[in-house]
Amino acid sequence: MKTILVLGANGSVGSELSQSLEQVGHTVRRATSRTADAGAVHVNLLSGDGLANAMQGVDAAFLLSPTGHVNVDELLGPVVEQAREHGVQKLVLMTAIGVDTGLSAPMRTVEREVEASGIAWNVIRPNSFMQNLNSYWLHGIAHADAIMLPAGTAKGSFIDARDIASVAAALLQHNTFDNRAFDLTGGEALDYEAVAQLLSAESGRAIRYQEISRDDMRAGLLGAGLPEPYAEFILLTLDYFKRGDAERVTDAVPLITGRSARTMTAYLKDYRAAFVRS
């Protein structure tokens, strides 16, 4: 059994990953920026506080780009260096689909640092999370009965965060796919109109897709308190989607986990409580 460090252990991927690894007997060191979380180690990527301590005795580590920040090379570069200094044997880094085609230069810089670290590695680049519907896009669904985005009519191969966690768990435990990068997608490509129809059927509500402008999206993101650079990054990911670049379906999930990726319908059934009106 291994000792595995999980950054972002409270997130949609990190929480599922931690639980999955613990269920099969690994010791999981849950790292979070929150100081009060019981059973977790405090790591502040902005200052580096707690990082060296968190790396002590670690066999493998899961790294991800922290939400709300675009300077991920500055934040995760020291993590890669600490992993090297502490003899970590495996790194799995999560970035985002499109990073290798120029979507985010800082994320690609971190990918290259991981690849050049001398440590066995994998990079996983997931497509849009299904869980965005019950988190980031939920306000519009709850208050306006609409998925409100500047995404056009393009399709995307949305992926369930639980499938991302399953892929990460397999890669952290086994060496079969060492030193490879994978674009992670669901098994089908849907446009947001189709997603709205599925969501309507599952929730019993009439939910539509509403195209909004980039400017309106930017205003909404900034109004929700997101830093301007991060809001611009989200807009870039939506541009990527609107161009049709997120439509491609890969076989990475079944290849690595041995089972098919979850469908949007399955996700909506599991998260139905987030969308129904009481």
Image (cartoon, rainbow, N blue to C red):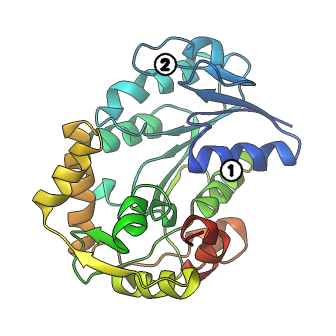
Image point (43%, 36%), residue name: 66
Query: Mark 1: which amino acid?
Result: Glu
Q: Residues within 10 Å of mark 1 (few under 14, many from 20)?
A: some
Q: Position of residue 201 (x, y in %)?
A: 53, 88
Query: Mark 2: which amino acid?
Result: Asn
Q: Position of residue 73 (x, y in %)?
A: 34, 31
Image point (28%, 40%), residue name: 226
Kindly give the residue lying farthest to the front in the view shown: 278
Quadrant showing the N terminus = top right
Asked if residue 44 shows in the view, the reply is yes
The CA distance from mark 1 to mark 2 is 21 Å
Q: Secondary structure at mark 2?
A: loop
Front-lying residue, 179 or 275: 275
Q: Position of residue 248 (x, y in %)?
A: 39, 78
What residue did someone put label 2 on?
44
Q: Which mark sits nearer the N-terminus, 1 or 2? A: 1
What residue did someone put label 1 on?
16
Quadrant showing the C terminus = bottom right
